[in-house]
Amino acid sequence: MRTQLAGEEVEFRPDGTLFWPSESSLFVADIHLGKGASFRSQGLPVPPGSTLATLEKLSLSLDSGVQRLIILGDLWHARQGKTAEAVEQFLSWRSRVSVEIMLVEGNHDRKSGQLPVGSDIQTVPDGAAVGPFRLRHEPEPMDEGHVLAGHLHPGYGLDGRGRQSMTVPCFWITPGVTVLPSFGTFTGCSRIRPSESDRVIVTTGSECREVPISRLAESSSC
């Protein structure tokens, strides 16, 4: 789904990424590598495979039009999740990916320690400018530029007849800030509380669709 954002044409993609065609740049938020391993280190019975699944999903997102990947925080979930296996999987993936990668550190990244040697990732400061956009992890507006952020794992609640209810990931566009959905395969989402001045674009994994303002409703965690 293509639309205008901060005067630029951008594409909201079904996988939860945001593509900026004129700069061949792909934005993604909240990857949370090693989350399953982190949970298992605490004795929780979480099955393995989420890190590899997330990396495979990310590979599919990096089509031929992408030359730069910009991660809006929380590449890694926790220090305990940086197991030898998870790091090996990540570095193997990185060796096969030729795009430039930039990272704005999120709250989980700061607690996870330094990036593995060989990551070849440029860490940029919070609020760094890229064209008309400002790169942040937490979605706080700035005096200049349109903020792109993550952190909230936004989701939109769909309620049907018979009291059926489900929550799907969404892009949440507020004045001055766009929040991307979480990308990781083991992250979940939280229902948002949009206002009438906001835009909400839901993604089912196969399509993106903007929700009419009249249908926006308040919500809670999923």
Image (cartoon, rainbow, N blue to C red):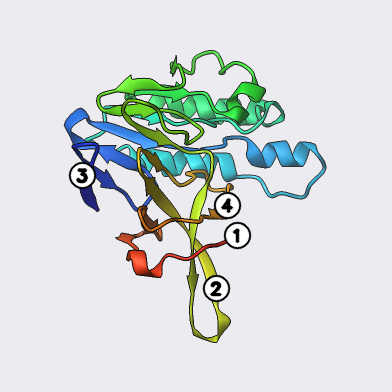
Across and down, in percent, residue 57 comes to 43, 44
Q: Distance between the Cα atoms at labels 1 and 4?
A: 13 Å
Q: Quadrant of residue 41?
A: top right
Q: Give amino acid for label 2.
A: Ser
Marks 2/4 in contact by CB < 8 Å: the verdict is no
Marks 2/3 in contact by CB < 8 Å: the verdict is no
Q: What's the mark number on residue 188?
A: 4
> Which sits earlier in the primary sequence, circle 1 or circle 4?
4
Q: Give the camera-side residue of 47 and 132.
A: 132
Residue, x 51% and y 55% (percent of image)? 192
Q: Give amino acid for label 4.
A: Gly
Q: Which residue bears the numbered disc 3?
A: 4
Q: Which residue bears the numbered disc 2?
A: 165
Q: Residues within 10 Å of mark 3 (few under 14, many from 20)?
A: few
> Which sits earlier in the primary sequence, circle 2 or circle 4?
2
Q: Which residue bears the numbered disc 1?
A: 220
> Which sits earlier in the primary sequence, circle 2 or circle 1?
2
> Which sits earlier in the primary sequence, circle 4 or circle 3?
3
Vertical arrangement, residue 138 with respect to residue 165, above or below: above
Which circle, 2 or 4, is nearer the viewer? 2
Across and down, in percent, residue 70 comes to 38, 28
Q: Residue furthest top?
A: 117
Vertical arrangement, residue 177 with respect to residue 120, above or below: below
